[in-house]
Image (cartoon, rainbow, N blue to C red):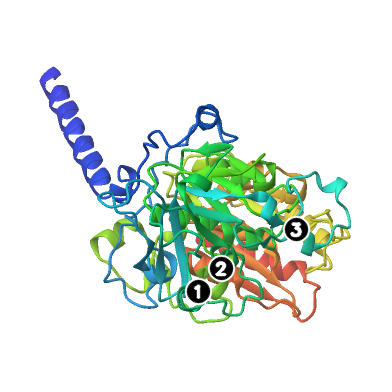
Amino acid sequence: MKKKKLQILVSLFALNSITLYLYFSSHPDHFRHKSPKNYFPNTGNRFSSSENHHNFHSSITSQSKPWPILPSYLPWSQNPNVAWRSCEGYFGNGFTRQIDLLKTSPEIHPGGGWFRCFFSETLQSSICEGGVIRMNSERISMSRGGEKLETVIGRGEDEELPVFKYGAFEIEVNDRKKIGKKLTDDEFLKKYLPEGAISRHTMRELIDSIRLVGIDEFHCSEWIEEPSLLITRFEYANLFHTVTDWYSAYAASRVTGLPSRPHLVFVDGHCETQLEETWRALFSSLTYAKNFSGPVCFRHAILSPLGYETALFKGLTEQIDCNGASAHDLWKNPNNRKTARLSEFGEMIRAAFGFPVDRQNIPRTATGPNVLFVRREDYLAHPRHGGKVQSRLSNEQQVFDSIKSWAMNHSECKLNVINGLFAHMSMKEQVRAIQDASVIVGAHGAGLTHIVSAAPKAVILEIISSEYRRPHFALIAQWKGLEYHPIYLEGSHADPPVVIDKLSSILKSLGC
């Protein structure tokens, strides 16, 4: 008997070892840092004694957070064979064309900065990164940013968006022929950072402001040694648009092969919002550009595309023929029409808040499945917002009360109806409610964007008024591989029995 138990233990240990080997061998980016050959962390004796004192000080003082292990993770390594307009081209690393704008030559010009971009033919956008870069915030016109919302009521949007003067960003070079010149020209910007339908392309404007300077002119009040993402945001208080920014920042971090989660610098003047809780959870730290005192220098800076350039946004106006699939299936059988990237991203959000990401079955509490009703509430979103949200379901309270009453008398199994008052919940509580839901019900609205973090077997029931027949959440469900059901209304009033009938059918399919 003891011998048999020992054999079982040995077998389980061997199986576990093989599983871990296969996982880590397929996750090389967890241990790979694609530092360019011209990246020099050792600054030598280029600083005066006073500058060396500042070199050990930084507004970003926290250690970088490690990447969590995600069940849906697939490698983000450079693959030149990614097909144009494939699912990987849209959602993964389609940024396969590398353009080196500035290289340093250790043999001829030791030290100095570097800059390069990775262009995506599919998304028509670039992820860029560089080293030994100085930000001169006094040359960026915008409000300070990060203020409490109540203190800046009525402030105009133009005050919050950055305007970059020439030299707002600078890169040190040792080649005398390059000193005083711009990093790039209009031809590069048009080809690799096209404006498209974006009225103000702030990443393009930032790169256009970069000036090349010599060693004698390159002085820093402080250095940021760890990789930092420079982010500019537009619709920063809207969950859907912020999720596109989160996704873009996550993709940029993976494409550039960062060994751990980067620090964030918001190069905008927006006030603080509830959504910053998730920004802080996802990345290592958060600072506003105007919060630095004096010119700050980055050993490694990354610029992520605008959220408007992600597949999440582009899918609203162009056909993206992709369906969600498990990473395990795609690892064994690659398919250009399937993706696990949104599932990976949703797991990243859940892991950032410390929630388990290894559950693959239908969420079910000890008392029964959760039915989450995502509510729309009045709340003050930004300085120009009146605090009132436009109703997408005129009798929302009636529908919710009817579902709750019906659930109390449900004979097949115990149902937990969750009142999703997201405007009055922390972001962590919102993500918890989403991941624990078997069925997610709600009228069309930004709160449903949280379904990116839903469990793989969750079912979505969207109630759509005639005025808001937009594909946002049907597409996210499709790209995640979630079961999705719409209820189309003639106006904005829903018939509770119709909603309950559809919900009952869904629950029956879940065995309840």
Is 121 on the left or on the right of 284, as rendered?
left
Q: Give the answer, above or below, for where 15 lies relative to 38.
A: above
Along the viewing direction, whichever of 319 and 171 lies nearer the viewer: 171
Q: Residue at x 82, y 58 (%)?
A: 397
- Proximity of marks 2 and 3: CB atoms separated by less than 8 Å: no
How many callouts does the rendering have?
Answer: 3
Quarter residue 373 falls in? bottom right
| Res 476 visible | yes
Residue, disc 2: 204
Residue type pointed to by label 2: Arg
The percent coordinates of residue 365 (x first, y second) are 56, 41
Amino acid type of the residue that numbered disc 1 sits on in the rendered structure:
Leu
Indicate which disc, 2 or 3, sits on the residue closer to the N terminus: 3
Q: Where does residue 425 sit, x and y in percent of width and height?
A: 73, 44
Looking at the image, do the residues carrying marks 2 and 1 touch, with CB atoms under 8 Å apart? yes
Check disc 1 and report the residue beneath it: 189
Q: Residues within 10 Å of mark 1 (few under 14, many from 20)?
A: some
Element under disc 1: helix
